Structures are given as C-alpha cells and as structure tokens.
Amino acid sequence: MGGLSSDSQGKLVTGDGGYVLEDVPHLNDYIDDLPIYPNPLRSNPAYSVVKQYFVHTDDTVPQKIVVHKDSPRGIHFRRAGPRQKVYFEPDDVLACIVTCGGLCPGLNTVIREIVCGLNYMYGVTRILGIDGGYRGFYSKNTITLTPKVVNDIHKRGGTILGTSRGGHDTSKIVDSIQDRGINQVYIIGGDGTLRGASVIYQEIRRRGLKVAVAGIPKTIDNDIPVIDKSFGFDTAVEEAQRAINAAHVEAESVENGIGVVKLMGRYSGFIAMFATLASRDVDCCLIPESPFYLEGKGGLFEYIEKVLKENGHMVIVIAEGAGQELLSESLQSMNQQDASGNKLLSDVGLWISQKIKDHFAKQNKMPINLKYIDPTYMIRAIPSNASDNVYCTLLAQSAVHGAMAGYTGFTVGLVNGRHTYIPFNRITEKQNKVVITDRMWARLLSSTNQPSFLGTKGVSDDKDEEPSAQLLDGENVQDEKTGT
Ligand code: ATP
Ligand code: MG
C-alpha cells in the first residue's frame, strides 16, 4: 500500500488511481509537530506475543467487496487499530465522554470500554464524563470516570452519563473543552450528534487546538450509512421478539385475532424487517421504504381478510415511520419538532389499529379482535446482548486507538467486517435505508407471503422494467450491510 498521495480534500489516492481512500484528518495535518512516542502497548507482554497486533498506517478497508468494473478498487477507509507510534503521552491525556440523543442498548458498554481501554491499554487515568449530553459541557459539573466506577455499568440499560436533545452551543462547548484542558473527546450518538461532533471538530481546528474528536455512531434503527450495522441493533431485534411473541399469543387465543406491534424505525425499516425474518410469526411487515395502501385490490385490508380466513389470526409489524404519508392531516403533527429539530411523527401503530378496527366494524361480516403492542421504550432501555457487548467493546477500543494515534474528526465503524475510521461527513451525509428492490426485502416478502403493494399504485410490476429511481434511493451497498 505504499505510494499514497494526498489531494487537497484530505483524501488519498493511490499512485495508479486504483482506489480512493476516504481519509480521516490527523492532528499533524494542521499542527506542526509529530507524534513521536512509542505506543505503550509495545512494552506490554500481553500484546507483544500477538502477531501483527499493530495496524500498518497504510492499511485500508474497501467499502464494497463486490466492485463495479468502472471502479476496480472503489472507496477505501483507513483501518482502525493500534499504531506503533502515538500522538499523545498517556500522562498528558485528559479525555471526556459524552452521550447524546435517544437511548440505545450498549451505550454503557461503550462508555465502560473507552474508560477501560484508555486506562488498561494506554495508562490514561484522567477521564471525565459529561453529564446530560452536549449541554452538560457548559451547564453541569463533570463526572470522574475510572475503571472501578464503570465496572458493572454494561449490565444496565441507558447511559450512566445521561443524555439530552438540543442544547448544542458550539462555542460554549469548545470553550469548555479548552478551559478544562481536554485533549480527547469521545462522542457517542446518532446522526444529529455526529453532525454536532463535526461542528465541534471544525471549531477546534479553527482554534488550532491539539484535541482529538472521535465519534461512536449510535442508532438503534441501523440507519447510519457505510457501516455494516450499528451497536444495539442486534439487541433490539432480539428484544422485539418478545413483543411479537406476545402479539402472536394474544392473536392466536381468540377468533380472528390480530396482533399489531410497532417497532422503531423512523426512516429505515431494518429492525422491523429483521425482527420479522427472525420471528416467522409475522404475516405482514410494513416499513417506511415500502409504501402501502389500505383499500382495494392488493391492499392491506384485503390481505388481512385473506389471512384471517386461512389461519384465524395474524400478526402485523409496523415500523414507526411507515405509512406516514397515509395519515390524515388532522392526525399529523406536521410542524412539531423535538428539541433537536427532528420532526415528530404521528403514532402510526395507533392509527393503523383504528383503521383496521373501523374497516371490519363497517363491514360487519367478520368481527375481529385486535391487540396493539408498542414495546419501543422497553426495547431502547435494556442492556445490550452478548454480541452487541462484543461489538461495543471493539468499537470503543478502535476509538481509543485512533484518538491516541492522533486521528481526529472520525467515527469508528465496521465496514465489511473490518474496523475502520470514517470521516464525519461520510456518516452524516445520507441515511441508510432498506432497498426494497434488493434481495433482503424479497426474502421477507417470500417469508411472510404478504403483498408487495407495488402492483396497482403506479409502480409497474413488469419484471423486465427497471426499478424506479425512488426505490433505488438507498445506500447501494445493501448486500454488504445485510451480510448477503
Ligand atoms: P437519535 O436520533 O438516534 O436519537 P441523534 O444523535 O440523531 O440520536 P438528536 O437529538 O437529533 O439525536 O441530536 C443529539 C444532539 O446533537 C442534540 O444535542 C442536538 O442539539 C445536536 N445536533 C443535532 N443536529 C445538529 C447539527 N446539525 N449541528 C449541531 N448539533 C446538532
Ligand atoms: Mg437522529
């Protein structure tokens, strides 16, 4: 991988133009001194026996395994991991950790592993927790974090640091970082948080501070692009099974029973799709990416009638952002926003349950018995499961290695099964969505046997026709992300 040369955007291009490296900034890029310290892990016998423990600085990871003929080597990211040399001397480090946005299983595990990683791997002892999200930088006292303080926190849901929406005042936050002498900032949060992190990074850079800013992307919805999956997603899919099971038991126990379960997914239906595929009890899964309609041929009501006639009961899973366009103006909280400026969605679960009840009451030929379950807050609040705990640990360790090496303005993330450093802008520029013309959604349709809702609503079901641009408007690396 020798011969990397840098262009003006900070991207590195191979000498022969074979691939593009979406590089992350390094503190040396704009501060005129070099990291000269040997990595303390080099003298630790536990690591010295590991073959190739240290990542070569030129190692990269391709974004796509299957590459297009016009782009033979595609986009690469810098591989995460410990470097032979580090930018910071451990005694000089004052790190801080902040969590922002909604709750997600695994937040406490990430906090724990950043603290333990800094302390056990690098001997860093000064680590602060920022209380209550971004506004905690300037409105609250900090919390001292040690391995002892965080020892058991991964067994608890939520975040021991607290979280919040809104309250992002960039200059006050950077003032606080500067005044306290913090030189490593670990920011755990979703798309909004990472946009905030990017602004903080830019302000730090403008002021010429030697501060590394590292993000750990948090989104239970798995809607962050580029990365294989986000932490907490597996746990959410697993916990959703309990709600689906309950809905199934309720529906099965009565005549024409219908169980409706609303799951998270404001703009991306990954949790609903994977929970449905995992369960096998779901007869219909509705997600934001796949428009549906209620009345008429091929509509939802017709399908419900068919399933009830055949099986006597059914389970519907609906993602919270599904069918928003169908909700009447009166139901829509059109102009309402949360403190961070995110649009508030109407409760589609309540709405669809009422619509189904009204439809069958009007028909008067098939009395139904509908139960609606909304497990959203129960799922968000649980501790992460075993696989997410492992994932959180590796993400946290990658972030620590990256910041210690002097990288900044990056988030950590798994790309094609390898841990990488990804520039902020690549993570925040778009959302990852279920691509309903990809295999995974087709697998779901054949698993539930539900209608595709594509045929009669202006989208051709001619198999030879190219799918519409709107349907393809998702992250086009779906096969990699879903492991297919
Ligand atoms: P989730 O949506 O998964 O709950 P999130 O990180 O997107 O997580 P938000 O409430 O949207 O949650 O944002 C979290 C924090 O990031 C808030 O404090 C908000 O003020 C800040 N933030 C959001 N967008 C921006 C932005 N464009 N610039 C600066 N700060 C932002
Ligand atoms: Mg968000």
Image: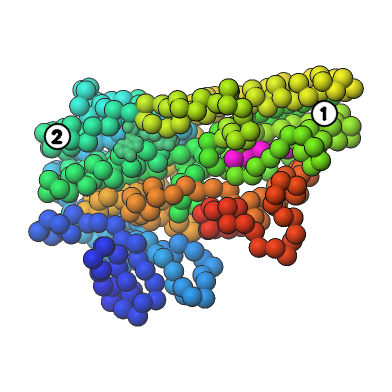
Where is 233 relative to 466, above or below?
Answer: above
The residue shown at (55%, 26%) is 332
Looking at the rendered structure, the secondary structure element under dot 1 is strand
Q: Is residue 452 visible?
A: no
Determine whether the beta carbon of the residue marked 1 sits less than 8 angstroms from the nearest atom of ligand 1.
no
What is the count of numbered marks? 2
| Ligand 2 located in image quadrant | top left
Q: Which residue is mark 2?
A: 175
- Magenta residues span 284-288
Q: Position of residue 53 (x, y in %)?
A: 34, 60
User: Which mark is first along the chain, 2 or 1?
Assistant: 2
Q: Main secondary structure of the magenta part?
A: strand
- Tell me, yes or no, whether the highlighted magenta stretch contains residue 286: yes
Q: Position of residue 376 (x, y in %)?
A: 55, 27
Residue 309 falls left or right of residue 442: right
Quadrant in which the N terminus is drawn: bottom left
Residue flagged by tag 2: what amino acid is it? Asp
Residue flagged by tag 1: what amino acid is it? His
Looking at the rendered structure, the secondary structure element under dot 2 is helix
Q: Assess disc 1: are there few (<14), some (14-19) or many (≥20) residues with their C-alpha within 10 Å of its C-alpha.
A: many
Q: Which residue is mark 1?
A: 313
Quadrant in which residue 2 is drawn: bottom left
Where is 184 relative to 364, above or below?
Answer: below
Q: Position of residue 100 (x, y in %)?
A: 35, 32
Q: How is the image coloured?
A: rainbow
Quadrant in which the C terminus is drawn: bottom right
Q: Position of residue 214 (x, y in %)?
A: 29, 46
- Tell me, yes or no, whether the highlighted magenta stretch contains residue 188: no
